Structure formats: structure tokens, C-alpha cells
Amino acid sequence: MLQPRRTAHIAEEFHRASVDVAFLQETRIHGETECHERQRLLLAGPPAGSALQGRNGVGFSFSRKAERQKPGVLQQAGNASRIGGAGDEEVAEFYRDLGEAVRKVPNGNPVVIGGDFNARVGERNEETAAVLGRFMEGQRYPNRNGQCLLEFCLEHELVVANSFFQHPPHHKGSWQHPRSKKWHELDYFLVRRRDLSRVCDVRVFRLIDCWSDHRFETAVTIRSVAEATTEDKGTRPAPEWFAETCSQLLPLLEHKKKARVVYENVSRKGETGVESKRREYVRARNAAAQAVRRARNAWWSQKGRELEEAFASNNFSKLHRFWKELQRPQGRPGINAILKEGQKAGDPPLTDAGEVRARFGRFFEGVLNLPSQAVEGVTDRIPQARVEWWMDRIPSRAEVREAVKRLPNGKAAGADSIVAEQLKAGGEAMISRLLDVFRAVWKERGVPKVFRDAVIVPVPKKGDRLLCDNWREIALLIVAGKVLAKIVGGRIQKRNKKKIGESQAGFREGRGTIDMLFTARQIMEKARERQIRLFWLFVDLTKAFDTVNRVALRVLLLKVGIPPLLTESDIIMSFIQDMKACVEVNGERTEPFAVKNGVRQGCVIGSLLFLILFEAVVQEALQGWDAGVEVEVDFAEPFTSKKAGRSAFKISVTDLKFADDLAAPETQERRMQEFADRLQAECDRWGLKISIKKTEMMVQPGRGEEKHTREPRQSTIAIKGQPLQEVEQFRYLGGVMSNDGSLNGEIYHRIQKVGMVWEKLQGEVWKQAGLTTKTKMHMFRGAVLPPSSMGQRRGQPEKTRSGSWSHGAWRV
């Protein structure tokens, strides 16, 4: 690098391309030096004589325009470390040093970090949404350096600017692999999240030759601070702790404001008593400040203790509500724009409120009326079960009282604007009225029309919110109808407890995602110990609840023993027959449209009816087929000796289901293909559709086989002649399953979750000097630690990765 011809060439290239500031890396020099060519080069590297001499090194290049900036506008710092090939300790030390450099920069100053991090950060997901944009090229999951980079960005509120700008692949990749000749994006620009609006573009500039195997990465930053900070960001809501304590704080704040006005008036007019008025104002100001600090500390301390108690008592719903509030985006609520049919990202969207509302109405009408045709006589092979006559009795007062009691509070009202709290406050008089209505339902053999209809509210999913496909529907139902649905649903659930197989854990009391994850990981762990090749098929159904064929469902309910009074007389089916729905957008509703297919979402009956149908589909697919993974269960009976009390039996695990999510393990490729064919054929018979695009395969290698598959590839397993995608990792029921059978992917996933919660609480908790250490520890134990262990029963990470959690926790 120090050769004159190289420094002159690089300076000339930067000058020709009008580059004001450039970051140089791997300059391979020792000590510090400065070169003056067409640009000013500041270079630094390891000390002369050290073991690292001739390696690493960083530098900066400044144009004359950049050098003319006034003092304090431009600060530079460099780190001569190298990330590639370093161990966990070296990488952790590098990011600690880099973090210290970032913390020394005043909060009001922008930070730009650029360099070759040798990192592949993977695709954007829920945990990395605060760091990555939508346009990230490369592999699906991050590597070790990528995980460290993401955690560093979360900790210091930085974003990867490259991922927020869409470019073709040849303008994204900065380094070409010498063997595969594939371009990878390893060089990144990191900026503060609040300064992202000042970065106009980041891309690779292929015409600059810098004597490097990396292409030159450029970040165009031309917006001034004034332009970036004067945008309309909407009204910022008051903090939650202030909203709950404002009744005590407002009098003190008002007194402080009045004391200030009096002091300023006396001081301006030159009247006597200025000093006493000043002291009075200072006392009022200090009293208000102390009250605010005490109120904030008391609120966060109470919140932390509540979260700790929720975690200790397995009240995960309370923890999830808190995390959901943290992830709620700030800014102006409402849906202001959407793309119309046929448009793509980048096209001008619809902005008129009426057009946006009509677009959502057409979209959800199509989603809720997907065609579904079942084969005639699809239930003929199912034997007639004994009729459960106890299910058709008229609801009793005790059942109505219990159903009202079990209604969740804090939920949105239906079309009648009546919430659950109002029914509960009605007492026995309200229960009597409801009981009269339900008796009329049994007499008339059908539910009232208002019990069927729903109000659809769009809720955003991941991805571009201008696309209707990235919105899902939430159905708001009449609360009185929910009471009746709970009564009938309770009876169906009691029946399902005996009739639905153990492999189904969805919508069942005492079962959850943890059971399915634990079983899947146990199978993978045992296969890894014995070095057996294991295939996993993860099936995704296209709009499973919305494509249930109602005619086939009615016949199936009679076959499985549901009394005719509830089926043929339409007490159950009348919840969905002749159903209508309208879409509510920004408080305004569309015209109602008919919903002619599927079961009702948001209703307990709809979920339970789907379980019955999906269980029938899977059992029919497995009929006459003896396959799956054979598991030997060995346990000791209580109150017996260890030797005499031990017993063992073998079971065959063919599938693991949670509602419409199905995972199927198999040890032979041929039998895995046979199961896929059987399931596809049976879904076609019942009118369900398997999404080939989202259905994926994962192969856990056996003895002597390659352990890792870095990039997704086509599998040898196919559905309808289309090969499925084979992946290295799969997100299954909130956990991460890896094809090597280890917990490395799960550890990275947990670190990301912990880092996300930590980052969200930076400004509100960790950086608040007014909060005591005890309060911060309550929040740490109640909000930050639970994501690291929730939903996890057991497992063993690889020894080489055992330090990843400790290093990640230290950085957090």
C-alpha cells in the first residue's frame, strides 16, 4: 500500500469518482503514516516488529472538500483488527473495542462505520427488522460474524444501510468466491437508525480500481441535517409511565410553570424580590423533577416485578403482550396507502381513503372465498362412530355462567360495540337473558344472523405494507355469539380430547408448541447420536381455514359422532352458513359481502372443526401405511425398584401437528416421498391445497455424509413433480431446527431475541440515570432474560459453540 504508484493510483481513482471520504481496509502497513496525493490518505496498522506486521491495517482518504469542513464536523477513528478467521474471543474483543469507540461519539453526531466485516447477515426477520431492510442479498441465515454484527447493531442502535436500497445483484455483491465464482455482500455501511434518512443510496461502484479483491462500496449521503430532521413524523404519544401517573405529576408541573412565569416577569420588569422568586422557581423545578424521577422509577420497578412474577408463574401471555408493545411502530396510525391489483413495489399507490377501503374489501373478499372442491363421497371410507348424544342438550345456566366468566377482557367489540366486560357486569340478569336467547336457538335450530356476521380488520404482517398480501384479517364478532360458541366449542373440545390423536397439539388443553418442539428435537438428537439419516417434511397449507369445504365438513361431523341436532339442524353449521363480512379501514366500513367457504376465524368452533377435518385427512393418508420413525420409550414406574420397575415400548412417530402446521420425520427417502404423495392426494380429495413454495425439506445427514448445506437447494422429494426446497435451518413453531441436529441455530435465535428486547429498552430504561440499579435489574430479569429460556426444555449445543451464548450475553 505504501508504494507510491499504489497510493497515487488509489488517490487518482477516488478523485476521478468524486469520493469525498473513503474507508480503506487491509492496507497491510505498520505504524501510522500520512500521504498527500490528489487526496489526503491517513493510514494506520500494527506496530513495527509485532506478530501482525504486514497484515491488517486501516485508513481514510479525504478530498480537499472534506478537509475544508469546520472543526468538529468530521471525526475519524480506525480499528486495525481483522475479523476473518478470528476466534470467538478475538471477535468479541474487536466488537468491544468498536463499541467503546462508538460510545465516545456524542449522541447528536452521526456515526458512519464502513468496512469488510466478513459477515453474512442473512435475511430480514422479526428479530433483525430493527437492523436490516428488505433488500439483503446472500444466504438465508447469518454466519458467525454476521450474528456478531447484528448483535452489535442492536446494542448501539445502528442499521445496515446496504439492506435498505434495492439494486441488481451485480451492484450488491462486493467479493467473489474464488471457487464458486459467486458474488457475496461482505462489506457494509452502518449508520445510526435516526440518520438513515440522510443516506440516499448504497451500492457497489465497479469502475473504481483499488488494488483489491473487493469491489468499491459507496454510500451517497447528500441530505443536510436540517432536511433530515424537519420531516413530519406524526404525533409522539406520551410514555406509558407518564400517562398512568400524570394525575399526580400535573399539579407539580403546573406549579413549576407558573413559578417560572412569575420569576421571568419580575426579572424582566426589574422589580424587587427577583432572588426570592428565583429560589421559589428553583424549588418548584427541583420538586417536579424529583417527583418525575420517583414516578418513573416506581412505574418501571412495578413493571419489572410483574414481568418477573409472570415468568415465574408461566404466564407467558403477559410477557408476549409486553414484547408486542415494544415492537409496535411509532408514528401516525391508520392505513393511508395501498397498491391496487396488478401493481408491484415501486408503483404509485392508491391514497384516496375510499379507494384504499375498496381495495381491501376486494382483496379480503377473494381471500375468504377461495375455491375448494371436495371429491364426492370423500367420507365414504371413514367408519361411522358412535353418536355423542350428550352434546345436543340445551345449555344450562351453569354453562352460560362459566362461558361468560371465561371471556377474555380487553378485546375489541363486534358490530354491536358491546365488549365482554359489559356482559360480565350484567350479572345474573344478563345470564338469564342470554339463556333465553340460547334456548330460542335450540328451538329454532339456527343462530341469529348477527351471530354469524363479522367485521374484518386488516393487521400488517412482515414485508411491504403497500402490498395487500402482507396484511392478514382479524374477525371482530358479536360477544354474545362468542358465549354460545364457547358452550358448543367446549363440548366439541371434550369430544376431541378422546378422538383426536396425540400428534395434534393445537387448540387442546394442556398441550402447546413446547411439546411438539421437544418431541422433534428428541428425535433429531437420537438420530444424531446413532448417525442415522433423517428426513423432515414441513408442510404448509394454503389458507387452510379458508379452504375447508363446508359440504364435506357437514358430512364428516355426522360420521365422527356429532349429534344430528347440531349438524343437520344447522346449530353448528349456521355459524358459517350465509355468513357475511365487511372490512373496516380507518374507522370506515365497506359494503358487506358473502363468505361462502371455509370456517370462521376468530371463533373457537371454527378452530375445533378444522382439527376434526385435518385429523381425518392425515389419518386417511396414513391408512394402510406402516412407516415413520420408530421410537423406543424406556421409563421407570414409581414406587418400585429400579430394576423391577423398568418397562419399555415402541411407538412409530409419523407426524407432529399443531393446528395446520405439520412436520413429518422419516429415515428413508423413498418412504418420505411416499408420505408426501399420500398427503397430497388426500388434500386434493378434501379440497385443501399444499403450498409447494412454502413447503420445505430438511435432511439431517447420517454416517459419513456432509453436515452442512450453506445455501437452500432443490430437494429430491417432490410434490406434483415440483421439487421442494431443502434448507439448512427451519423455523418451526417459534424455534429453530438445524440439519446438523445441534442447537446452534436456536442459540443465535435466542441471542437475537434478547438483543432486540435490550435495544428496545435502551432509551426508556438502561440509559435513564433516574432509574435505580435495583429497578433495572427487575426489568433485566423480567423482560430480557425470559426470551433466552422460554419454550425450551432441554438440548445440548456443540462444544465449539458453547461460548456463543456467553459472548452474546456479555455484549448485550
Image: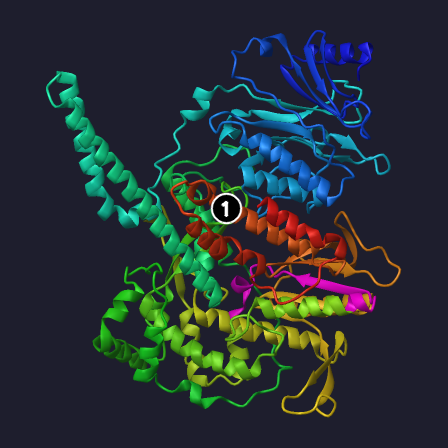
Left or right side of 92 for 546: left
- Along the viewing direction, whichever of 248 and 289 lies nearer the viewer: 289
Label 1 packing within 10 angstroms: few (<14), some (14-19), many (20+): some
Q: Quadrant of residue 797?
A: bottom right
Residue at 65% of width from left, 54% of height from top?
A: 747
Q: Which residue is mark 1?
A: 468
What is the x, y in percent for residue 557? 52, 79
Image coordinates for residue 762, horizontal then vertical, percent? 47, 42
Q: Is residue 39 magenta?
A: no
> Residue 281 versus residue 85: which sits nearer the camera?
281
Q: Magenta part of the protein: which range?
A: 527-550
Q: Farthest left residue? A: 272
Assign a secondary structure to mark 1. Answer: helix
Q: Is residue 244 left or right of residue 370?
A: left
Residue at 41% in and 27% down: 231
- Give the vertical position of 293 relative to 744 (above or below): above
Name which residue lies at 13% across and 16% down. 270
Q: Position of residue 497 (x, y in %)?
A: 53, 81
| Residue at 55% in and 56% down | 787
Image quadrant where one finds the N terminus: top right
Position of residue 98 relative to residue 474, above or below, is above
Image height of 119 relative to 504, above or below: above
Residue 570: in sight, yes or no?
no
